[in-house]
Image: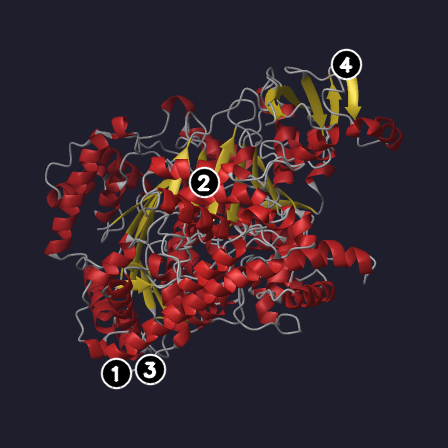
Amino acid sequence: MLPTEVYPGSEPSRWKYLDRIRTRPGPFTNPDAFDGSLVAEAIENMTVLTVVELTSHSGAGGLGCEILKNLALSGFKSIHVIDMDTIDISNLNRQFLFREEDVGSYKAEVAARFVEKRVKGVKITPHNKMIQDFGEDFYMQFQVIVCGLDSIEARRWINATLVNMVDEDVSDSYKPLVDGGTEGFKGQARVIFPTVTSCIECQLDMHAPRAAVPLCTIASIPRQPEHCIEWAHVIAWDQETPFPALDKDDPEHITWLYKKALLRAQEFNIPGVTYSLTQGVVKNIIPAIAATNSVIAAACCNEAVKIGTSAAPMLGYPDENYMMYSGNDSIYTYTFKHEKKDDCPVCGNLARELQVDPDWTLRELVESFATRPEAQLKKPSLRGEGKTLYMQSPASLEEQTRPNLDKTLVELGLAEGDEIGVTDPAFATVMFKFKLKFRISE
Amino acid sequence: MTEIVMSQTPPILHGPSAKEKKYDRQLRLWAASGQAALESANLLLVNSGPGVAGVETLKNLILPGVGHFAIYDEAVVEDADLGVNFFLDESCLGKPRSQCLTALLTELNPDVHGSWYPNEETASTLEYLLATSPVFTAIMYSFPIAPERLALLEAYGREHKTPLVAMHSAGFYSYFRISLPGAFPIVDTHPDETATTDLRLLTPWPELVEFAGNMTKDIDSLDAYEHGHLPYVVILLYYLEQWKQAHEGKYPSTYKEKTEFRRLVQGAARTDNPEGGEENFDEAAAAVLKTVVPPSLPSGLREVFEYTPSEPIEERSSFWIVADAIKAFHAKHNSLPLRGNVPDMKAKSSVYIQLQNIYKTKARQDAAEVLETAQSIAPGRQFDPAEVELFCKNAPFVKLINATKGGDSASSSSVDLLREVTAQELANDENAELTMMPLSLLPIYLALRATSHVDSATADEILASIEETIPGSKDKERILKAAQEVARAEGGELHNIAALTGGMVAQEMIKIITKQYIPIDNTCIFDGIASRSQVLCL
């Protein structure tokens, strides 16, 4: 028979249901890691960080409201939230902490005020900033970090930062990261124990970037409505600059692109250009609904509760660390262990093998980093063993190394097995290490 | 990748309306037709226990703009509600829960109307509410529920053909079960765009043969640009013809033949250019295994063809008439109506558009033939040509849910089914290590089901109740643990598990209301300890 004693926290009648689960063990609870009498106090003293939608209003987003609600109703008392975004009308179909009169205000502030008012006793500190505005000292104060970001770049940045913070001698330096994301009826939730389990960089190839349309198709042989829209976006706009700078959230700008794309489509008899499609392509809009956010945010916060209480085994310890969810065709979840990679540029220590053609110019190598699923680096600077190959900045160094871009790898003296180090301004602290492997061109 | 729905309306030169802006992210999933269905829906939630999963479901339906909801809930708000339910606050203590929930939920979306029961002015009992309200589009209820109340809802579902959704969330566990009124066909299933390519390369029709023939008659003397811009459909048709002539009039059919054919295509690319190859020939070679296939009848559609609705023809929905017409089309042509989409491929703009039009024209002809057949099957009936066209386009992907109807929760046939499924699931678990399959979540369903009508129960009581339904189950370790885990919660909900369940139920409600995407058939169990789900037909 299992123990039945409950150890209530500060408001026993309010947290009645939660206390039954978090303060007494169940059949799957690890008895060595669990002491029910300490749970309520421990949770009340924890500080949780929520990092949500950071880029503009394009992405799925909307996990933030759910995460804040869920954490507050999971017994956490001290929560910080980072979000530099302001509220847009298209957020209202899923972001339930906002009303029409809040459009234009900072999301973090409005959400924090709302949840504090609704759930008494919780303190939520909003930060209308970017994650990159904070350093390790800031991130060190949290015990768990829950992310509902809509960009891969932001996820990679926070992941790299948390991995770098790990100091083997300081147990408090390990910050578990819980990450969720959605697209339409699908989503995923995962838990990362930095340096211990597979990290976001290890899993990067699961989020391969969409193949870009070749420029020659856009410029001369369009076939799809999207090709016409890209033409308006990347070619017509630059030629005509109807406004000083493209603001993708300005309906006037989108309308201009839409009209241009429509003319182009008529010229080539291509059907299907609409305002909605124009907006979707230009802003790279990902469809999003409340229901999926509800599933994924709750799956993440459920893991945060398990990490905070040990009331049940959490994802990542010891095996499964990743849940894929799909609701398009029935409901299907796939919960599995994503293996840590020894050659992960962030948490591994081996250089990753990089298939290259020795006849490539350095420019081709530099450009290839943007599209390689396992790299996805847009502004890479490269160093070889003992020499600088190409630097994006400062300008003087860029100018000095620019001539290298037109030399082939062989001409630069690079050989099979050489290690190159790659840095990118989006990941200031990380050096991606690669080991060259030549493939013979046919 | 999720398929993105494009607006069906012709382009207009003004921006989106306020409503289109607000609902932009979901209109890309279910389009204006799905939104209209959602906005005309009228839902009832019959709530009990902590009742959070039901409330979270409503939140997820109110935000996207469901038309009307009603909550029937006899509870009075107490302190424990405030620790688990986000749509109640301290000012609600001591007040009717349905009233407070309705106030804080309707605040989420001014387009949505809500009402609450019991109240003094209108209905004081569930019987009265059901008897006097306009027919509900769907009814959701939470466990635990009194058996006579459940019987009342099930009777209503049968009488009005109203889908019922039951949900039970306790501690780390939950499940929900959908009871649909009879077979539920879906046409607009949103298949993955990559799965929909149907180019009919082995059964080309005269217009396509002529088009490809004209482009390739002097293939070797084409200049580099023309040769490098032949669409891969044309390339494959040309080399299939060559292959046929060299192989006694037969197309490549085995895997070995197809890989050989692929080599033939790849080898035909010109390599005497700066790129050392041709992108369109690469595309052609890559498409061989997927597109050089004879027409087939997918299992979902076969099930539709073989199913005979119980109603006489005059009372059948147009779905079944059009399905019959497509069946006749298939019998006559040994292929389905053409979908008519052409994937993007390297080609000159004008050539690609011509090719696209050849496919579209054929698709329209096929749909017109189906429409004519449908009219001859049901004379005097009006069919929406757009609906017939959509059916023809999606024919390979149509899906029939709930074709074999389970009984009401207490009927003897449903208990037999449960015993059968339990035996199967337990047998699967014994081989789980070999098959590398995750363990069954059915024990969770069994343990929750044992508390369908009581607020809480001990593990022993739960096991005794399961044993009564499924003799011999009390000694199974997984069932024992599930019973202990359910007992641990004493009927209490964890907010996260309730929110997660409410998200899944809301997705399912959207699919049922919009008749888009594919709903579960019919029970989904969630394990918040292992963070995974399982769908079973129970």
Amino acid carrying mark 2 in the image: Asn
Please rate how many residues cluster around mark 1, counting C-alpha atoms within 10 Å: few if below 14, some from 14 to 19, many from 20.
few
Q: Are marks 4 and 2 on the same chain?
A: yes
* Residue bearing mark 4: A386
| Disc 1: host chain | B
The residue furthest bottom is B380
Q: Are marks 4 and 2 in contact (CB under 8 Å)?
A: no
Q: Considering only vertical position in the picture, is A190 above or below B522?
A: above
| Disc 3: host chain | B
| Disc 4: host chain | A
Alpha carbon distance from label 4 to label 2? 48 Å
* Residue bearing mark 3: B382
A270 to the left or right of A333: right
Q: Are marks 1 and 2 in contact (CB under 8 Å)?
A: no
Amino acid carrying mark 4 in the image: Gly
| Disc 3 versus disc 2: nearer the observer | 3
Considering depth in this image, is A10 or B537 the residue closer to the camera?
B537
* Residue bearing mark 1: B379
Alpha carbon distance from label 1 to label 3? 9 Å
Q: Earlier in the sequence, mark 4 or mark 2?
A: 2
| Disc 4 versus disc 2: nearer the observer | 4
Amino acid carrying mark 1 in the image: Pro
Where disc 1 sits, the SS reads loop
Where disc 3 sits, the SS reads loop
